[in-house]
Amino acid sequence: MAKENAVTKENEMTQEGFDPKILGFFCHWCCYAAADSAGVSRYQYPPNVRVIRVMCTGRIDARFVIEAFRCGADGVFTGG
Amino acid sequence: MIVTEAARQLLEDCGVDRERLALEWASAAEAPRFVELITGYVSRIREKGPLGSGPDEIPADVVGRRLKAAVKAAGARKPRTLLGKLAKKMAKEGDYSRDAISKGVKAKVFPAMRSVRIATEVGMILEEGPADLKKLCSDTGASAEELEKILAPMLKKGQISRKKDSFSLSS
């Protein structure tokens, strides 16, 4: 049953066609912990975000964001 | 927020939808809120499609060069100093509304970022071969007067040379 679910899920993803690549900058103390606790309490959320943990959102520079887009990210999510 | 606004304006200048960069807050105790934010954001990006496919966006192959120049512009000394000065001024005034930040960045920091971006891009284009003003205009998205202003100091310093209408890198 679980396998079947996984297969239908995969089909859904390919049918939708576009799977965005999103880069996430998460603050270690806030959003990163929130993401962690979301995982622990088994909330479901899309797996498109690749996370980079920073010690504070203030560490993020405009350069990081633009470099991310240059490397082919479709979106950048900053979580403080 | 000031840095994000600067990045957004620079992205817009490069032909990238500013909404692709999100800045949200969720505390460590707000897992459900976090899930909501991420889900909403991913579906919004899904609607927009891949980078360069939006109505106001420029194609992905051109955007690459422009973003490369923009990285340089974001790291250049002058815009960074201006960004610091703006942050100091805003802290003094205590007005952190979105509108005030957007206006401040647009007036104080953006022109410097844009001119570095264009100057860097001109260098990249000329590296591939000589080009005339028209080609430089259409490739960088700058107006002719703007470009003249940027090219003049480069000519003066001898970084580039001019032969009639065509510009090339000095060897």
Image (cartoon, coloured by chain):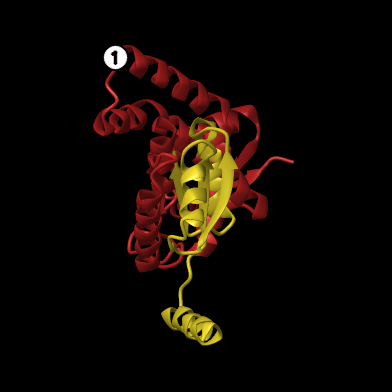
- B162 and A53: which one is in front? A53
Q: Residue furthest top?
A: B92
In the depicted structure, whether residue A61 falls above or below residue B41: above
Image quarter where the C terminus of chain B lies is top right
- B86 and B146: which one is in front? B86
Residue at 56% from the left image edge and 85% from the top image edge: A3
Residue B46 percent across, percent down from the top left: 39, 67
Identify by letter the chain in red. Answer: B
Query: Is B101 displayed left or right of A41 in the figure?
Result: left
Q: Find disc 1 in the rendering and name its residue.
A: B93
Callout 1: chain: B
Residue B110 percent across, percent down from the top left: 40, 33
- State whether residue B119 appears in this view: no
Label 1 residue SS:
helix
Residue B142 percent across, percent down from the top left: 41, 45
Residue at 50% from the left image edge and 43% from the top image edge: A33
- State whether residue B61 appears in this view: yes
In the depicted structure, whether residue A57 falls above or below residue B47: above
Q: What's the amino acid at mark 1?
A: Glu
- A10 and B121: which one is in front? A10
Residue at 54% from the left image edge and 38% from the top image edge: A28
Residue B91 percent across, percent down from the top left: 36, 16
Q: Colour of chain A?
A: yellow
Image quarter where the N terminus of chain B lies is top left
